[in-house]
């Protein structure tokens, strides 16, 4: 099983001036530790959880990934996940393409339907009803895939009309950067994973095995109806519990048995570099021996 590190806090001892060197050190530590994926959130405001508040530091996501790309060599880079409302679809495809080219083919598009209404209102960004956000998400997935193809023609949708879909340079990663769709909604989100995604990302805690197993069964059903290969989709989870290495590894044994291939964990407490170093020392060597079985 692979591990990813999802950085969610930027309020480090020493203030704003230490954010950049801390993230650079964290990226280098992730490489040394054998971390497969490095991600940050895509929000305008801090979320107000983990003891944080909206006024705490929050970096713009894709700018941060560009910085991390310059301080790493092999780790995948993504937002976990961007809200469909935050950027126009063609611009989003262009941004991810740029990250992919400049990182040497290491970008992943993580995307979802968006949910944090407060930051939309704060920044004057439209926040349509949930049903419309999902319709926009489906159109966005179609646009992104067209931008990453040989089709430079127009796109006519309900919400987006593009005269051209020129995207030069194209991403280095072929056939295109993987598309990870975040969320566990059974009727819409997992259907979109089956029809458009290369990876899913589900929330999980130590005792969520049966819930995650059920979600994977739902995804398999959507794949059967869509005529897509369930085994092709990378199954990932975002681990949302306080981190104890032994408890974590016991939980991952169960997730590996049901086919989970990658787990993303969140460093908290103001020292992401130290957290990643400990992952490399105590967790990664044992985690890599857990082979997803899909049973």
Image (spheres, helix red, strand yellow):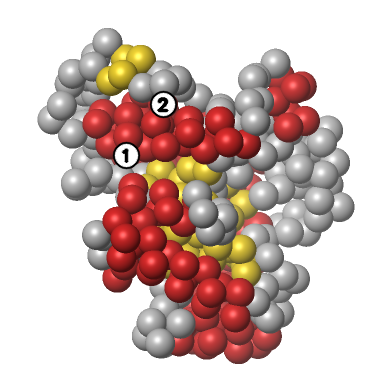
Which residue is at a point 48% across and 33% down the rendered structure image?
Answer: 135
Answer with left or right where residue 127 lies relative to residue 67: right
For residue 133, above or below residue 213: above
Q: Residues within 10 Å of mark 2 (few under 14, many from 20)?
A: many
Given residues 31 and 295, the one toward you in this image is: 295
Given residues 288 and 257, the one toward you in this image is: 257
Does the image show residue 37?
A: no
Please state the horizontal and vertical placement of residue 72, each as a whole percent of the image: 41, 50
Occupied quadrant, residue 242: bottom right
Answer with left or right where residue 283 lies relative to residue 110: right
C-alpha span from label 1 to label 2: 16 Å
| Foreground: disc 1 or disc 2 | 2
- Residue that label 1 marks: 100
- Residue that label 2 marks: 89
Does the image show residue 194?
A: yes
Which residue is at a point 52% across and 38% down the rendered structure image?
Answer: 134
Which residue is at a point 42% across and 37% down the rendered structure image?
Answer: 138
Task: Mark 1 and mark 2 in contact? Answer it, CB < 8 Å.
Answer: no
Considering only order in the chain, which callout, 2 or 1, is on the residue closer to the N terminus? 2
Please state the horizontal and vertical placement of residue 229, each as a whole percent of the image: 26, 65
Answer with left or right where residue 74 lies relative to residue 31: left
Given residues 54 and 213, the one toward you in this image is: 213
Please state the horizontal and vertical placement of residue 144, each as a whole percent of the image: 33, 33
**Which quarter of the image is occupied by the C terminus?**
bottom left
Occupied quadrant, residue 290: bottom left
Answer with left or right where residue 53 lies relative to residue 239: right
Q: Residues within 10 Å of mark 1 (few under 14, many from 20)?
A: many
Given residues 159 and 263, the one toward you in this image is: 159
Q: Secondary structure at mark 2?
A: helix
């Amino acid at each position: 099983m692979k591990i990813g590190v999802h950085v969610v806090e930027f309020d480090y001892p020493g203030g704003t001036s230490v954010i950049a060197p801390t993230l650079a050190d964290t990226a280098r530590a992730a490489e040394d530790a054998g971390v497969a994926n490095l991600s940050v959130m895509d929000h305008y405001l801090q979320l107000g959880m983990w003891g944080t508040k909206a006024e705490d530091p929050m970096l713009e996501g894709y700018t941060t990934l560009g910085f991390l790309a310059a301080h790493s060599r092999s780790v995948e880079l993504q937002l976990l996940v961007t809200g469909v409302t935050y950027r126009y679809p063609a611009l989003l495809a262009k941004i991810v393409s740029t990250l992919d080219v400049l990182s040497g083919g290491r970008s992943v598009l993580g995307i979802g339907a968006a949910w944090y209404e407060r930051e939309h209102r704060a920044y004057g960004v439209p926040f349509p009803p949930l049903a419309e956000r999902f319709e926009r998400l489906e159109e966005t997935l179609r646009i992104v895939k067209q931008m990453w193809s040989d089709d430079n023609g127009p796109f006519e949708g309900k919400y987006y009309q593009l005269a051209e879909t020129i995207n030069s340079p194209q991403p280095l990663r072929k056939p295109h950067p993987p598309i990870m769709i975040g969320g566990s909604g059974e009727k819409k989100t997992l259907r979109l994973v089956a029809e458009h995604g290369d990876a899913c990302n589900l929330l999980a805690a130590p005792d969520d095995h049966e819930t995650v197993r059920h979600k994977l069964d739902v995804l398999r059903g959507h794949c059967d109806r869509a005529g897509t290969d369930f085994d092709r989709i990378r199954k990932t989870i975002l681990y949302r519990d306080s981190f104890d290495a032994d408890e974590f590894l016991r939980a991952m044994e169960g997730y590996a048995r049901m086919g989970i291939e990658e787990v993303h964990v969140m460093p908290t407490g103001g020292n992401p570099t130290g957290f990643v170093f400990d992952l490399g020392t105590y967790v990664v060597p044992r985690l890599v021996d857990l082979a997803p079985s899909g049973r």
